[in-house]
Amino acid sequence: MKNTKQKFDCTEVEKRVQQFIDGVLNEEETALIHEHIDYCLPCDKKIEFEKKLKDFIRTKAGEKSYPPAIQAELKKLLK
């Protein structure tokens, strides 16, 4: 039996960035992304940018008063 350890390339990481940030990937996928970003600076920077962007949007969305229906929709999207 061959021991073939799966690895993620940049394309695989890109497909899963938002799920990774949201913490919804399984343990194996999360570990594979961590392993990839340990040596891939562009993917690491992409993930950091996406995290900061999501935090910025969450902060800005909380600063204004929106109708309840829009607030509920924003909360769903940002979870």
Image (cartoon, rainbow, N blue to C red):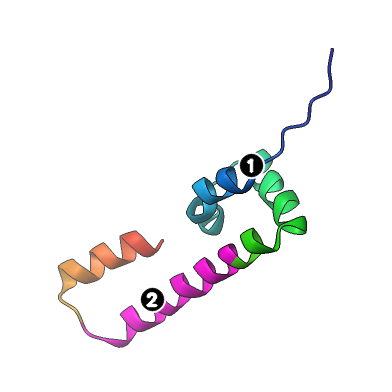
Q: Which residue is mark 1?
A: 29
Vertical comparison of 32 with 60: above or below: above
Tell me residue 9's x, y (percent): 65, 44
Instruction: Between residue 24 and residue 51, name the one nearer to us.
Output: 51
Residue 56 painted magenta: yes
Instruction: Between residue 15 and residue 28, name the one nearer to us.
Output: 15
In the image, taking residue 24 as reference, residue 27 lies left or right, namely right
Residue 4 painted magenta: no
Vertical comparison of 32 with 23: above or below: above
Q: Residue at x 54, y 71 (%)?
A: 49
**The quadrant where residue 11 appears:** top right
Q: Which residue type does callout 1 highlight? A: Glu
Q: Which residue type does callout 2 highlight? A: Ile
Residue numbers of the magenta segment: 46-65
**Which residue is most to the top?**
1
**What is the chief secondary structure element of the magenta stretch?**
helix
